[in-house]
Image (spheres, rainbow, N blue to C red):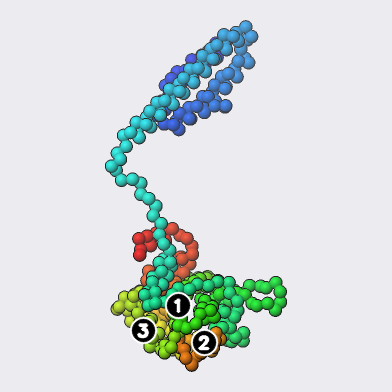
């Protein structure tokens, strides 16, 4: 009994000296002294060791000790609340607040929107189509029959069909399939651009990816010439990269255009002196183009003797690479906030 009384007196001295000015400190006091595994619970457990004739006296002492601890807890709680309220009242509301986290548009979306805006000023409408496409709209209608060697130029993701003999389905390899659907449902004059995501079975690296983004254009009307194509693309380059950029056309081959050409611009990274991006030539290819093949027009019932047209297609990643000096395609799809923050405020 005497030992228990001495312990309680020691605990009172210890508790009386405690100061707690925060809510966390007050909660720690409650857990330590009044919690289910706290000191008060332990002291109450000593009653079993008190002789029966002294249990009434010990019970009164323990009850007084419990009241003492609870009053100390309530006092600490009130003091902590007053301290926090005083701190809030003393806040200087003229100081700047915490900075808000500002989001940003993805660089590919920035460039895609700029490309669309440039061609819209020339009267091009924006059209979109399905990413899961049938073989006809993706290949056949574009003058690539099943045995055409040009199909080997595009490694395709095919979708397995449940029934044999059904139409082959695939993930589109270019947005030319949207052009096919437009020619199928609209009559000339046609002037559209077709932005969208496309898929090819490529090994992912800094220079290649299994999906990327294109913007393709199509213009069909009477008396459309290659000169119209060149002037349209000259205008695009000047609006996108500035009037000092040099341009050249090189003959090329695409099954759906004839004649066909690739368009190069002077390398913006090395300014034409030669670097790894331009392979030390001073030139970078940015798009393919050409006059719509007469057979493609005939596939959709468009009179190739009356109408002519041109088409072009560019990779948004390539344009973004040149505009923002981004050399690794993988960065666009890794969702790295450090990379995306570099484009905050970019218009």
Residue 321 drawn at (x, y percent): 41, 71
Q: Earlier in the sequence, mark 1 or mark 2?
A: 1
Crowd around label 1: few <14 · some 14–19 · many ≥20 (10 Å): many
x 45%, y 21%: residue? 72
Q: CA distance from mark 2 to mark 3?
A: 24 Å
Would residue 215 be seen by someone viewing this image from the given angle?
no
Furthest toward the left, the residue is 94
Q: Earlier in the sequence, mark 2 or mark 3?
A: 3
In front: 30, or 301? Answer: 301
Relative image position of residue 217 (x, y in whole percent)? 45, 79
Give me the disc on residue 281: none
Local SS, label 3: helix
Whether 54 is drawn above or below 315: the answer is above
* Vertical side of 146 occupied by 170: above or below: above
Numbered label attached to residue 302:
2
Q: Is residue 236 left or right of residue 332?
A: left
- Residue at the extreme top of the image, as rendered: 53
Callout 2 secondary element: loop
List the residue tagged with mark 1.
192
Q: Is residue 196 above or below residue 151?
A: above
Report the side of 122 relative to 41 (left or right): left
Q: Which mark is residue 231?
A: 3
Q: Nearer the viewer, residue 19 or 276?
A: 19
Image location of residue 291, percent across then percent down: 45, 87
Residue that extends furthest to the bottom in the rendered view of this protein: 305
Mark 2 or mark 3, whichever is nearer to me: 2
């Amino acid at each position: 009994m005497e030992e228990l009384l001495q312990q309680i007196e020691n605990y009172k001295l210890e508790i009386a000296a405690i100061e707690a000015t925060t809510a966390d400190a007050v909660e720690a006091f409650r857990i330590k002294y009044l919690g289910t595994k706290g000191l008060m619970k332990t002291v109450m457990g000593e009653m079993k060791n008190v002789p029966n004739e002294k249990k009434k006296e010990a019970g009164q002492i323990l009850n007084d000790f419990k009241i003492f601890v609870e009053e100390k807890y309530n006092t600490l709680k009130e003091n902590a609340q007053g301290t926090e309220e005083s701190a809030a009242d003393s806040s200087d509301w003229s100081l700047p607040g915490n900075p808000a986290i500002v989001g940003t548009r993805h660089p590919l979306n920035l460039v895609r929107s700029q490309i669309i805006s440039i061609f819209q000023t020339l009267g091009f409408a924006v059209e979109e189509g399905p990413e899961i496409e049938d073989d006809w709209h993706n290949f056949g209608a574009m003058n690539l029959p099943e045995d055409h060697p040009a199909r080997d130029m595009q490694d395709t993701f095919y979708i397995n069909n449940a029934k044999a003999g059904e139409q082959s389905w695939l993930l589109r390899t270019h947005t030319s399939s949207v052009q096919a659907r437009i020619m199928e449902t609209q009559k000339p004059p046609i002037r559209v651009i077709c932005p969208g995501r496309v898929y090819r079975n490529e090994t992912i690296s800094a220079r290649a990816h299994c999906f990327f983004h294109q913007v393709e254009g199509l213009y069909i009307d009477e008396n459309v010439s290659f000169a119209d194509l060149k002037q349209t693309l000259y205008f695009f380059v000047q609006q996108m990269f500035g009037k000092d950029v040099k341009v050249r056309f090189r003959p090329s081959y695409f099954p759906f255009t004839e004649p066909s050409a690739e368009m190069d611009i002077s390398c913006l990274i090395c300014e034409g002196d030669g670097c790894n991006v331009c392979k030390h030539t001073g030139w970078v290819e940015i798009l393919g183009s050409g006059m719509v093949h007469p057979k493609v027009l005939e596939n959709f019932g468009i009179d190739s003797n009356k109408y002519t047209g041109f088409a072009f297609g560019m990779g948004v990643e390539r344009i973004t690479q040149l505009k923002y000096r981004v050399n690794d395609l993988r960065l666009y799809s890794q969702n790295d906030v450090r990379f995306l923050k570099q484009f905050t405020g970019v218009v």
